[in-house]
Amino acid sequence: MLINFALASLILAFLIIILWSFNSRQYKSSSTVSSSYDAWTNEKLLEELWGEHIHLGYYSKASKRIDFRQAKIDFVHNLVHWSGLDKLPKGSRIIDIGCGIGGSSRILARDYGFDVLGITISSEQVKRAKQLTSNNLCCRFEVMDALDLQFSDGSFDGVWSVEAGAHILNKQRYADEMLRVLRPGGFLAVADWNRANYKQKSLGLIDSLIMKQLLDQWSHPEFSSIKSFSHNLLNSQYCGGKIESDDWSKFTKPSWIDSIIEGFRRLDVFIKLGPKSFLQGMREIPTILLMRMAFGSRLMQFGVFRSRG
Ligand SMILES: C[S@@+](CC[C@H](N)C(=O)[O-])C[C@H]1O[C@@H](n2cnc3c(N)ncnc32)[C@H](O)[C@@H]1O
């Protein structure tokens, strides 16, 4: 009995690894990113397991065991306060760049009274974001490329972008576009997955292989370091002042294991979505574990950035 179980687990693990390595979502252009997010949105697995926010949670030292979904909501409020966005009056115009299915946008509109526009490269995310947003919220969504924002300079009082930069190859242009559309004196709030500064930490073979998987599996062309992205912001011709950054790895790290636990807590989701969704879920586990290892060993860091325009 035990041998059968071990054998079945081994075969399952083997199948997952084969699936995982052959069906890579390696970044080729921004259309790889849009097609990946279109597929993830339509599969519904991400949303059913992790809710409307596609970002990590914030676990403060003081908080006892908190729910992954609540930690994501806490993350949004913490970033609002840390960046100073809460100083803006109600009705302020905010752009949420790489808005996913609108989790942050809706909080910014509902809890802070902002007039929010969420943009994403994925048309399926825009459709889903619209379905999830009630008409009485001041919150709209459009398909748009972060590298080609269709707005004149200084159009927004606040610019918000969470975990989108890792999908973007031209980090300087990403920084330029965010700062260009921010009005003088407006607030910038950015959070992203960053790599360690390689000049300080040279990569061995294992770390290089880990980094390759972290890039290829989730359509990431390159991670910047916190230092290099701060430079991108500072070097921008649109930079109006000081850029400040911080490392929130310790506050966000529990998210990785929690995201796996959510899968086991919500097994009914796999029954609802069918057996394929179970395989899809299993496929993500190795990457999630590698992410946890990389954030644990400081190969990866969770950067947050703020500035006044
Ligand atoms: C990890 S998700 C984060 C979603 C959302 N910010 C959240 O926190 O729930 C990354 C998002 O960035 C968007 N994205 C990636 N590259 C983009 C680009 N070039 N232009 C616009 N959006 C982009 C993806 O479509 C996706 O919505």
Image: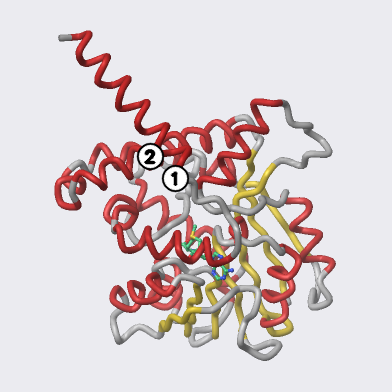
Q: Locate residue 220 relative to residue 16 in the image: left or right.
A: right
Left or right of 9, for residue 308: right
Residue 211 spot, x, y in % from top left? 63, 38
Could you classify mark 1 by the number of other residues whose Cα lies within 10 Å: few (under 14), some (14-19), or many (20 or more)? few
Residue 139 screen position, x and y as percent: 41, 82
Instruction: Kindly identify the residue that appears in the image at 30 percent across and 23 percent down.
Output: 11
* Location of residue 44 by image quarter: bottom left
> Is 280 positioned to the left or the right of 167 in the image?
left
Residue 200 in the image, given as x and y percentages of width and height: 82, 36
Q: Residue at x 52, y 62 (%)?
A: 33
Q: Quadrant of the N terminus?
A: top left
244 relative to 290, above or below = below
Q: Which residue is label 1 attached to?
A: 23
Report helix, strand or loop for mark 1: loop
Seen as rendered, the residue at the extreme front is 22
Camera-near label (1 vs 2) is: 1
CB contact under 8 Å: marks 1 and 2:
yes
Write down the quadrant of residue 209 in the picture. Answer: top right
Q: For the point 47% across and 55% down, which residue is it?
A: 55
The Cα–Cα distance between marks 1 and 2, rounded to whole angstroms, is: 10 Å
- Identified by mark 2, the residue type is Arg
Task: Give neighbour class at mark 2: few <14, some 14-19, many 20+ (Cα, 10 Å).
Answer: many
Please give the residue where the numbered disc 2 appears in the rendered image: 283
Name which of mark 1 and mark 2 comes first in the sequence. Answer: 1
Secondary structure of the residue carrying tag 2 is helix
User: What residue is shown at x 44% (from left), y 34% (from top)?
Assistant: 286
Q: Amino acid at mark 1?
A: Asn
